[in-house]
Image: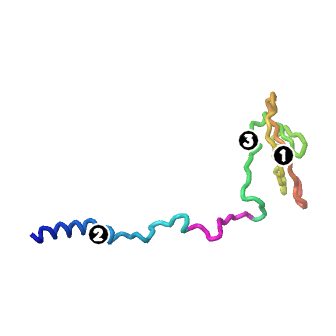
């Protein structure tokens, strides 16, 4: 009789207690953000010569050629090739631009302000 009660009790103890004996409760299998983050805040890499960490990509020449009027430093250009050549000079730095569609007009007006670095030869 004694063995009849002890055997199921041991079996029940083995089934319910064995996962606790073999489980890895204190070890993490995969690091979370707290484990991999830097001590002193996030690191931001700034490219040399830049003041900001982002840049804007704008292609003013992606519009159909006859639907745009370009103003480069106040000079009017209707020909896309001439405008590209003007901006394609060595040492050109774009300082600002605007992209507007005039109300009631069929053409788009793109104004670009730029400067040429000193000592750079123009075409």
Residue 107: percent from left, percent from top: 80, 32
What stretch of residues is rendered in magenta? 36-47
Q: Which of marks 1 and 2 is nearer the N terminus?
A: 2
Q: Give above or below for 4 relative to 114.
A: below
Q: Residue furthest top?
A: 104
Residue 61: percent from left, percent from top: 76, 42
Residue 2 belongs to the span the image colors magenta: no
Q: Name the residue: 90% across, 61% down.
A: 119
Residue 43 belongs to the span the image colors magenta: yes
The residue labelled by disc 1 is 112
Q: Earlier in the sequence, mark 2 or mark 3?
A: 2
In this view, the residue in front, 27 or 117, is 27
* Inter-mark Cα distance, 2 to 3: 69 Å
Magenta span dominant secondary structure: loop
The residue labelled by disc 2 is 18
The residue labelled by disc 3 is 62
Residue 46: percent from left, percent from top: 72, 63
Q: Residue 14 carries which label?
A: none
In this view, the residue in front, 107 or 81, is 107
């Amino acid at each position: 009789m004694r063995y009849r009660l002890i055997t199921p009790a041991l079996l029940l103890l083995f089934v319910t207690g064995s996962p606790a004996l073999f489980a890895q409760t204190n070890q993490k299998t995969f690091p979370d953000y707290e484990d991999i983050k830097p001590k002193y805040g996030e690191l931001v890499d700034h490219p040399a010569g830049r003041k900001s960490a982002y840049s804007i990509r704008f292609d003013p020449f992606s519009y159909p050629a006859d639907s745009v009027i370009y103003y480069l430093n106040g000079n009017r250009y209707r020909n896309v090739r001439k405008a590209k050549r003007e901006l394609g000079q060595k040492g050109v730095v774009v300082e600002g631009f605007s992209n507007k569609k005039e109300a009631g007009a069929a053409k788009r007006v793109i104004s670009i302000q730029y400067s040429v670095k000193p000592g750079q030869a123009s075409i």
